[in-house]
């Protein structure tokens, strides 16, 4: 399928937290295995992997591709449930496909009769355990040799400051310490996967110096770029892989991001990032737009209680994050008029920055951290609590419950206090239907074909190709193509 000027492929991977409140249901690790198995074996919503995608991290039967083009699986590092959206061109498709995955999880929990003892969250931090979970963004971009060495410096300022509208907010903070620098021998033996390729380990302590901040992840980011990220979390994790690579394009894997509950914030975050990556490729970002210390600025912006969000530039000058974002926005006006989606992003990006400058706390309908802070402060007033109360962490967590009947965010949305970009029917449709303009459509048809078979036979699914049996392999190298009618013209259809 032909792509329009400026169109990109994007997708998001969300790692979920699981909390067990009924000891009879076992451990979180057991619960997420049962949820995954129910989705594939009972609901038959996807084709579970018969092969190991990775002998360590994704062994056989750990997950698979769903009929809606997405992938649901258990990541062996931490044994957490993870959902990767289908490849998308449309922001609306992306958000709908993401929410559809959460609905599948909720359905499995309810039909397993686990709803009173199992809760799944799309938050990004464990307040008491000190763990952090990812919400990773993937973008198709030009594979430039100098990207990781030079031009990426022009991306950091955008990533560091976009949290003013993309942050999901959190109560309190964490401080990373060097105590317990190395795991014990027994730790490694008990949890070998957790420590593979780990060069060092930090410990985490609560930090009471900040009552509330914009980002759940900012306290845990210690590198700008890193390939080994278990205890070395970075803004960017280089993954120049074949999954998205096509015609000089490759996948950019962003680690610093969080799972937005608000549909609008989710779409704007991804849409603005797409435009900034285009600016980077087209050399339209001013060279002086670099930060003195990106990681220090990341934490300072997240923790700034004045909402001035000042950052220091490489020349020693300072600028508000709102104004730094406007530099990118003004440059991106070069793409105005290309498509309705581009114009929506440009218009809403400007509107959000204007709103944050005027009165941040009036932005609860569009910005997650604002909505969460309002909910927390209302609870504090009702219960006569201050910011040191442990109960606030529970309120923070329940904002991210993926079950609409339990989530504080969905209660907020039900009252009409959020700006939506979807209707509920869009989510219901996305539970079974893939995006109609990417290769997810063709892969989805092949998943349905495999599910219609009687008995288990050989098959193999990957993002860029499918083996239907031991003699038939269908290549899907172009993520913009739908591959809905297999033929020798678009791939290797071998019999």
Image (cartoon, rainbow, N blue to C red):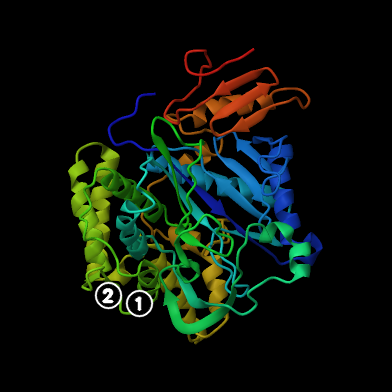
Mark 2: give few (<14), some (14-19) or many (20+) Cα within 10 Å.
some
- Secondary structure of residue under mark 2: loop
User: Which circle marks residue 139 in the picture?
Assistant: none
Residue at image position (69%, 27%) is: 459
> Which residue is more in the foreground, 427 or 39?
39
**278 over 384 or under it: above or below:** above
Crowding at mark 1 (Cα within 10 Å: few <14, some 14-19, many 20+): some
Q: Quadrant of the N terminus?
A: top left
Image coords of residue 197 (percent x, y):
63, 57
Query: On the picture, is 351 further left or further right than 52?
Result: left
Q: Is residue 107 visible?
A: no
Seen in the picture, residue 420 relative to 458 is either above or below; the reply is: below
- Which of the two residues, 467 or 103, is positioned nearer the viewer here? 467
Q: Quadrant of residue 357?
A: bottom left
Q: Quadrant for residue 79, please give it.
A: bottom right
In the displayed structure, would residue 439 be above or below residue 354?
A: above
> What x and y, as percent, mark residue 317?
21, 73
Q: Residue at the right extreme?
A: 24
Front residue (pair 402, 326): 326
Q: Position of residue 45 (x, y in %)?
A: 64, 36
In the image, 227 versus 63, the foreground residue is 227
Residue 316 placement: quadrant: bottom left
Residue receiving disc 1: 304
Give the quarter of the figure containing the C terminus: top right
Instruction: Residue at 35%, 47% (x, y): give it.
Output: 146
Estimate the x, y position of residue 283 in percent, counting from the top left. Answer: 23, 46
Determine the CA span between mark 2 and mark 1.
Answer: 7 Å
Q: Secondary structure at mark 1?
A: loop
| C-beta proximity under 8 Å, tags 2 and 1 | yes
Which residue was labeled with disc 2?
308
Residue 40 makes an appearance in the image: yes
């Amino acid at each position: 399928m032909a792509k329009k000027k400026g169109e990109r492929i994007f997708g998001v991977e969300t790692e979920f937290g699981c909390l067990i409140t009924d000891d009879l249901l076992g451990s979180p690790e057991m619960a997420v295995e049962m949820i995954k198995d129910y989705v594939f074996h009972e609901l038959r919503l996807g084709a579970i992997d018969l092969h190991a995608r990775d002998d360590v991290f994704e062994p056989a039967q750990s997950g698979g591709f769903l009929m809606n083009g997405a992938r649901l699986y258990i990541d062996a590092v931490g044994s957490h449930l993870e959902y990767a959206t289908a490849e998308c061109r449309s922001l609306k498709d992306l958000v709908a496909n993401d929410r559809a995955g959460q609905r599948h999880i909720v359905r499995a929990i309810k039909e397993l009769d686990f709803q009173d003892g199992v809760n799944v969250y799309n938050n990004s931090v464990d307040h008491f355990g000190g763990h952090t979970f990812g919400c990773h963004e993937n973008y198709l971009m030009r594979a430039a040799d100098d990207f990781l060495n030079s031009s990426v410096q022009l991306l950091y300022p955008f990533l560091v400051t976009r949290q003013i509208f993309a942050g999901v907010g959190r109560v309190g903070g964490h401080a990373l310490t060097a105590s317990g620098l190395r795991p014990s021998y027994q730790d490694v033996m008990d949890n070998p996967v957790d420590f593979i390729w780990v060069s060092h380990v930090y410990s985490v302590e609560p930090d009471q110096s900040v009552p509330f901040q914009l980002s759940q992840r900012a306290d845990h980011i210690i590198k700008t770029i890193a390939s080994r990220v278990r205890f070395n979390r970075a803004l960017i994790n280089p993954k120049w892989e074949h999954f998205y690579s096509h015609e000089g394009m490759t996948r950019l894997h962003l680690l610093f991001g969080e799972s937005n509950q608000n549909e609008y914030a989710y779409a704007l975050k991804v849409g603005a990032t797409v435009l900034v990556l285009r600016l980077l490729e087209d050399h339209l970002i001013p060279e002086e737009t670099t930060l003195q210390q990106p990681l220090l600025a990341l934490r300072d912006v997240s923790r700034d209680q004045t909402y001035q969000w000042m950052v220091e530039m490489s020349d020693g000058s300072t600028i508000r994050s709102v104004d730094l974002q406007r530099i990118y926005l003004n440059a991106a006006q070069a793409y105005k008029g290309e498509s309705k989606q581009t114009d929506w992003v440009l218009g809403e990006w400007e509107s959000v920055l204007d709103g944050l400058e005027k009165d941040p706390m009036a932005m609860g309908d569009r910005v997650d951290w604002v909505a969460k802070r309002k909910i927390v402060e209302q609870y504090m007033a009702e219960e006569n609590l201050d910011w040191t109360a442990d109960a606030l962490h529970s309120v923070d967590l329940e904002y991210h419950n993926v079950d609409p009947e339990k989530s504080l965010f969905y209660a907020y949305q039900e009252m009409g206090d959020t700006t939506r970009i979807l209707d509920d029917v869009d989510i219901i449709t996305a539970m079974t239907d893939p995006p109609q303009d990417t290769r997810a459509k063709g892969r989805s048809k092949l998943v349905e074909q495999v599910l219609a078979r009687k008995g288990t036979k050989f098959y193999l699914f990957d993002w860029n190709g499918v083996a239907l049996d031991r003699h038939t392999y269908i290549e899907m190298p172009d993520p913009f193509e739908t591959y809905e009618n297999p033929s020798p013209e678009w791939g290797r259809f071998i019999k």
